[in-house]
Amino acid sequence: MKMANPFTPLLWAVTLLIVMIQIAPLVVVVLVSFANSPVFEVTFGNWSLRWWERMATARGFWAAMELSARLAALSTAVALVLGTAAALAIHRGRFPGAALLGTILLSPLMLPGIVLGIAVSQMFRAYGVTDAFTALAISHVVVVMPFVVRIMLSSLALFDFTMVEAARTLGCSYGSAILRVAVPNLAPGLVTSAVFGFIASFDNYPMSMFLVDARTKTLPIQMLEFLEESPNPTIAAVSTLLLVLTAMLLLIIHRASGLQRAVIR
Amino acid sequence: MTQQRIDPVAWLAAPAAAYFLVVLGLPLALLLAASFRTGDGIGLAHYARILGDPFERGVILATLRYAALVTLACAVFGYVYAYAMARASAAVQALLLVAIVLPMTVSVIVKTFGWTILLRSNGPVNSALLAIGAIDEPLRLLFTETGLVFGTASILLPYMVLPVFAVLRQIPPEQHDAAATLGAAPVEAFIRVVLPLTLPGVIAGVAIVFSMTVSAYVIPSLLTGAGYKTLSKAIANAFLVIYNPGLGAAAGVILLAIAMAIVMAAGAAAARLGRTA
């Protein structure tokens, strides 16, 4: 016999309220981007595309978006190679300090980004690395790496390496066994880590803030500067665009490995 | 052969290890060194200046208080949310997951920007509170600690929900119901059966949310004005405005120590829980 729990309605009421609070900042940004008002307000019934037109011609944003995309693609590619190789070694675990190395590679998730930012910027200054893009790319690999290592470690834990042996017994060469058995099985993990890593670099603010210069500005830096200096709803249009892109990337992750598996260990 | 041979696969970790040594270990070591470097040699002058000055101490305490309030709010509401997710049907569970994963993945600047609009005195939050009669006149929320804690807790809530849900979903509902059948009141069944089993998830979530809050820069920058100082704002100020790298480095080391302390404390708590369980 199951008793009716008097707390159940309260549980669902609070949950519904949290859903609304989680979605509210995103909804309001979308509404403001279509509002015909020069200040940040929602004007129901008075829609306009003027802020979207303004964004289309605002050159700072497109340059920053292009730079951030290039930076994220490059740092994700490097982190994917280094991180996957490291995850393979840590997964086998047959060397001293494997667990410690795993912790260190995941540590940028827990360490204050702003501290990493000042630390690398001081180092680049000391060693004469003056090119902002180079400095950003080198540092962003550290930001992306934990996502690759974490996701690839859990993908490897689910992959049965005897399948590679089985393929070889059935006549595959070692290379072709890896290519035809291991890679397809690990592909969802690779895609998921690439997408999360790309987003981590694309959105990074605390590390980039100390590495950009006047000509090399990433999108988050440009956005915050815009918000602080000349706030108008153009930023809402940019934000809405980012929201749509993020939703599309999440869809890719969902197709690759299922949303729940991708975000929960 | 006396020497144990290292598995050749282990060498695959070497490039990543070397990379982190040069781009993470070395800069942090240099930062630590810089924090001790004073005008006339080596010393604790920067630390003394930060920890000895009531204003600077106040900044550290305000940051810790901010992180504690956000973590508490996330623990309570994140737990409720995770609990609802774990009890929901598969379809509702998927919806509840999307409702936190999409906001979690969206750029923190976009979310915080959304909160700056929501929290305005003529914004939607005040309108809603006025409409339901909870308040008589608009509250000042933006640029206040209340608004900051509320916005930050909302932005970081998913980081609490996910680890708690990961543990909760492994507890079969029958175990909860069994306690109820044996005569335990719902609250008692929850406190004595479910809560202890989910503590590891709560500890993990607390560590993540606390360390993310003490380190937060974008959120307090947009939700509070120049008057409200946090440790990360002070660090950015030391490097980008007043240009005092020694002072900034010392503040950075203090922030790093706080973040590492909470992570290690969480690790120790989890290990202790594992032993007694």
Image (tube, coloured by chain):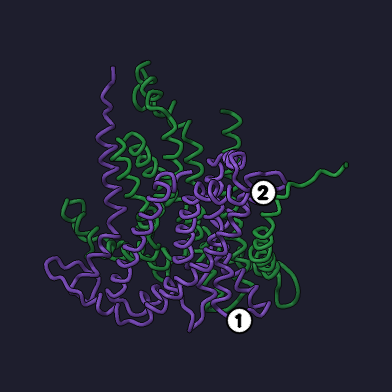
- Residue appearing at x 45%, y 39% in the figure: B166
Residue depicted at 67% across the width and 44% down the height: A93
Q: Chain of mark 2?
A: A
Q: Residues within 10 Å of mark 1 (few under 14, many from 20)?
A: some
> Exactly how many numbered labels are in the figure?
2
Residue B145's spot in the image, x, y percent?
38, 59
Judging by the rendered image, the residue that carries numbered circle 2 is A100
Whether residue A29 is situated above or below residue B72 in the rendered picture: below
Q: Residue furthest left?
A: A45
Question: Which chain appears green?
Answer: B
Label 1: state its secondary structure. loop
Q: Position of residue A263 (x, y in %)?
A: 44, 48
Task: Give the x, y percent position of residue A109.
Answer: 53, 55
Horizontal side of A122 relative to B150 (left or right) equals: right
Relative depth, front residue between B6 and B151:
B6
**Foreground residue among B140 and A12:** A12
Residue pointed to by mark 1: A130
Chain letter, colour purple in render: A
Q: In what quadrant of the picture does the N terminus of chain A appear?
A: top left
